Image (cartoon, grey):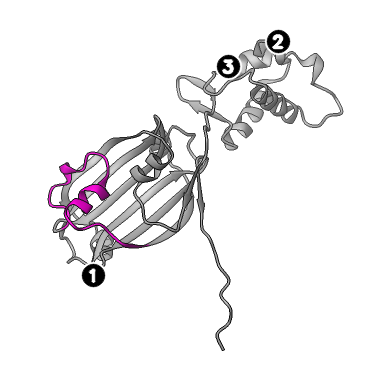
């Protein structure tokens, strides 16, 4: 069945079934759930939906915006509206200090990166502070878009002392593999999680709508000597990642 036929109003648009934009939203969700609109499929333009359903453009726009806010539909300027391809969610344990490459390989997923920055730069104030360096010191900075099986998942900006990573260009896939080779792999880390809504630039890179929910993670990693080894600022798509921590109740020690 085509989406045009599925949206014909006789079977679903009722005067006593709630606001019209809500009924249209539910109908579009049904189309997605039943596979009439597959992941990545384009939706008819608002004008065409209004003509098919007999609803106003304002009503159609309100229904579409609700689905965009929910992450069900993605709107791309100049291209139209598309069904979001959420794909399988990635469950990430917080019990082990592992790299993105190791995490995805354990799930049988192929990783790829788009380099946004890679080199020796003057460290920002927060970077040098977290790494225990003098203000304005040079640092190795790696900023990239991380993807698994071709799906963008995270933006990752890692900063390290140049003593541990004198040549950032050596990092092609896994940073931790390079650090382990040179005896500098971190053994402990502290992470801070913050919820945020994506700005336009980050949303475009992660292939989601501006304002979509995301998770910001700051991680400070340390060598076995206690020396700061890495300060990482990452943004993960909120619709793909679940972070899981195991908690234990310890008996009171009197």
Real-space Cα distance between discs 1 and 2? 67 Å
The quarter of the image holding the N terminus is top right
From this view, report whether residue 243 is shown above or below residue 80. Answer: below
Residue at 61% across, 15% down: 47
Q: Which residue is mark 1?
A: 225
Q: Position of residue 235 (x, y in %)?
A: 41, 47
**In front of the other: 59 or 154:** 154
Label 1 neighbour load within 10 Å: few <14, some 14-19, many 20+ = few
- Place of residue 173 in the rendered image (x, y in percent of width and height, measured from the top left): 26, 40
Question: Quick check: is 186 in the magenta stretch?
Answer: yes
What are the residue bounds of the magenta stretch? 164-189
User: Which of marks 2 and 1 precedes in the sequence?
Assistant: 2
Q: What residue is pinned by disc 3? A: 45
Residue tagged 2: 5
Q: Distance between the Cα atoms at labels 2 and 3? A: 15 Å
Secondary structure under the numbered disc 2 in the rendered image: helix
**Pointer 2: residues within 10 angstroms few (<14), some, or many (20+)?**
few
In reply to whether residue 101 is colored magenta, the answer given is no
């Amino acid at each position: 069945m085509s989406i045009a036929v599925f949206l014909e109003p006789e079977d679903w648009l009722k005067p006593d079934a709630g606001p019209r934009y809500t009924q249209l939203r539910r109908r579009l969700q049904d189309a997605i759930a039943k596979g009439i609109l597959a992941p990545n499929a384009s939706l008819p333009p608002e004008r065409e939906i209004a003509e098919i359903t007999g609803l106003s453009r304002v009503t159609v726009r309100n229904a579409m915006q609700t689905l965009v806010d929910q992450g069900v539909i993605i709107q791309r300027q100049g291209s139209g509206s598309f069904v979001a391809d959420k794909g399988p969610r990635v469950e990430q344990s917080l019990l082990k200090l592992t790299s993105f490459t190791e995490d995805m390989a354990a799930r049988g997923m192929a990783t790829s990166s788009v380099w946004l920055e890679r080199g020796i730069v003057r460290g920002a104030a927060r970077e040098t502070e977290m790494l225990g360096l003098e203000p304005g010191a040079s640092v190795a900075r790696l900023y990239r878009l991380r993807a698994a099986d071709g799906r963008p998942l995270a933006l990752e900006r890692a900063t390290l002392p140049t003593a541990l990573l004198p040549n950032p260009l050596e990092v092609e896939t896994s940073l931790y593999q390079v650090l382990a080779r040179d005896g500098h792999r971190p053994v402990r880390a502290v992470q801070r999680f913050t919820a945020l809504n994506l700005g336009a630039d980050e949303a475009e890179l992660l292939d989601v709508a501006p304002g979509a929910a995301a998770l910001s993670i700051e991680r400070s990693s340390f060598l076995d000597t206690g020396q700061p080894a890495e300060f990482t600022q990452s943004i993960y798509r909120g619709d793909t990642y679940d972070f899981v921590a195991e908690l234990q109740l310890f008996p009171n020690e009197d």
